[in-house]
């Protein structure tokens, strides 16, 4: 009879070991931040963490934020081989997706999201949804079942005192989420009033001239456009599109030359028709708002985000 307590103790120890191993390998995603208190203009670094016993080939997440308090700028994955898929962004919601050509093991930080504080406020960041993706037996992407969400809400306090923004150190292909606001100072009230009068008068004069021209002139092709480079070669520049069609590539003969190893000699072109502008892929990887563009012309509208190769991002303005 003395062996019964020992037998029960052994059973308890085995069960405890199994339970512990199961808890460590459970698939889960959670969100963390370096700090909870910030100054106006400072950078908030948010980290998306994940643990999975199954190697994954992608993940996605959505973060809800207050656009009056925070401005997202960009995101990147620290997992080797994970590339961002550029998606249209809605105010108040960061929508990010990443994919890899080969399975990757994750156990810790998988992505970073950078925000800039806009002013004094108390706010929350909420991880609204998140998922890990695998390739199923049929070869298609599928969500990994049984994922649990850990820490979903981060409370942040922003002071009105102005701080200094940090420069994001993004690993891999970044996702452009928005532009960081430039530090500004409040001008005197009289200067604001004077500029408003001058600017308002100029606008009225310009509108009247435009109305006279439009009433007498025949329909014309779309007005001149601008390519605003956000990332990669010539980042930060606004390049006017004077000549149409406008060829883009790494060769100097192009109207827009981008010296980048992932941009082909004749990568893409922008051309105009009577009803607007169009983008055409000429052989290199070309994406419009996250969708691949091949040799079929795709309508190009102001505000559209274009990615060429792995590194070059630009927005279109007309």
Image (tube, rainbow, N blue to C red):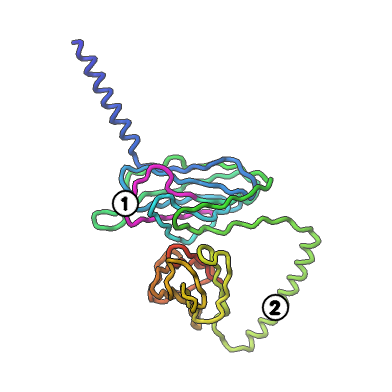
Number of the label disc, if any, that sits on residue 103: 1
Q: Name the main secondary structure of what is drawn in magenta.
A: strand
| Residue 228 placement: quadrant | bottom right
Does residue 235 show up magenta in the picture? no
Q: What's drawn in magenta, residue-wise?
A: 92-112
Residue 10 — which label?
Answer: none
| Residue at the image position 27 percent from the left and 54 percent from the top | 136
- Classify residue 232 as left or right of residue 8: right
Question: N-terminal of the two: label 1 or label 2?
Answer: 1
- Name the spot of residue 5 as percent of width and height, x first: 24, 14
Please tell me which residue is depicted at 31% across the width and 33% down the height of the picture: 21
Residue 189 as seen in the image, left or right of residue 274: right
Q: Residues within 10 Å of mark 1 (few under 14, many from 20)?
A: some
**Which quadrant of the figure has residue 238?**
bottom right
Quadrant into which the C terminus falls: bottom right
| x then y, percent, for residue 166 | 58, 50
C-alpha distance separating marks 1 and 2: 58 Å
Q: Does the magenta-highlighted stretch encompass residue 100? A: yes
For the question of whether residue 182 can be seen, the reply is: yes
Pick the front one: 309 or 155: 309
- Name the residue located 62 percent from the left edge and 88 percent from the top edge: 217
x and y percentages locating residue 263 in the rendered image: 44, 69
Outermost residue, left direction?
1
């Amino acid at each position: 009879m003395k062996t019964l307590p020992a037998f029960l103790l052994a059973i308890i120890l085995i069960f405890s070991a199994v339970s512990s191993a199961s808890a460590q390998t459970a698939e889960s995603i959670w969100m963390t931040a370096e700090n909870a208190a910030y100054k106006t203009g400072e950078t908030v670094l948010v980290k998306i963490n994940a643990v999975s016993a199954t190697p994954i080939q992608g993940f996605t997440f959505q973060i809800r934020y207050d656009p009056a308090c925070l401005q997202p700028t960009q995101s990147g994955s620290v997992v080797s081989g994970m590339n961002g898929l550029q998606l249209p962004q809605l105010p108040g919601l960061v929508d990010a997706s990443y994919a890899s050509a080969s399975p990757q093991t994750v156990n810790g930080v998988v992505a970073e999201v950078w925000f800039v504080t806009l002013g004094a406020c108390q706010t929350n960041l909420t991880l609204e949804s998140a998922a890990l993706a695998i390739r199923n037996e049929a070869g298609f992407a599928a969500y990994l079942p049984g994922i649990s969400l850990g820490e979903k809400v981060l409370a942040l306090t922003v002071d009105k005192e102005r701080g200094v923004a940090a420069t994001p150190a993004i690993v891999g292909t970044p996702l452009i989420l928005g532009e960081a606001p430039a530090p500004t100072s409040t001008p005197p009230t009289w200067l604001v009033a004077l500029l408003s009068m001058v600017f308002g008068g100029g606008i009225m004069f310009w509108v009247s001239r435009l109305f006279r021209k439009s009433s007498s002139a025949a329909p014309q092709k779309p007005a001149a456009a601008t390519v605003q480079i956000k990332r990669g070669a010539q980042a930060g520049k606004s390049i006017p599109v004077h000549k149409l069609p406008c060829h883009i590539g790494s060769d100097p003969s192009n109207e827009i030359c981008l010296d980048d190893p992932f941009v082909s000699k004749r990568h893409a072109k922008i051309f105009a028709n009577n009803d607007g502008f169009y983008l055409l892929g000429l052989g290199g990887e070309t994406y419009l708002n996250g969708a691949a563009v091949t040799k079929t012309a795709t309508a190009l509208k102001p505000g559209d985000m274009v990615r060429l190769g792995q590194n070059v991002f630009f927005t279109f303005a007309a």
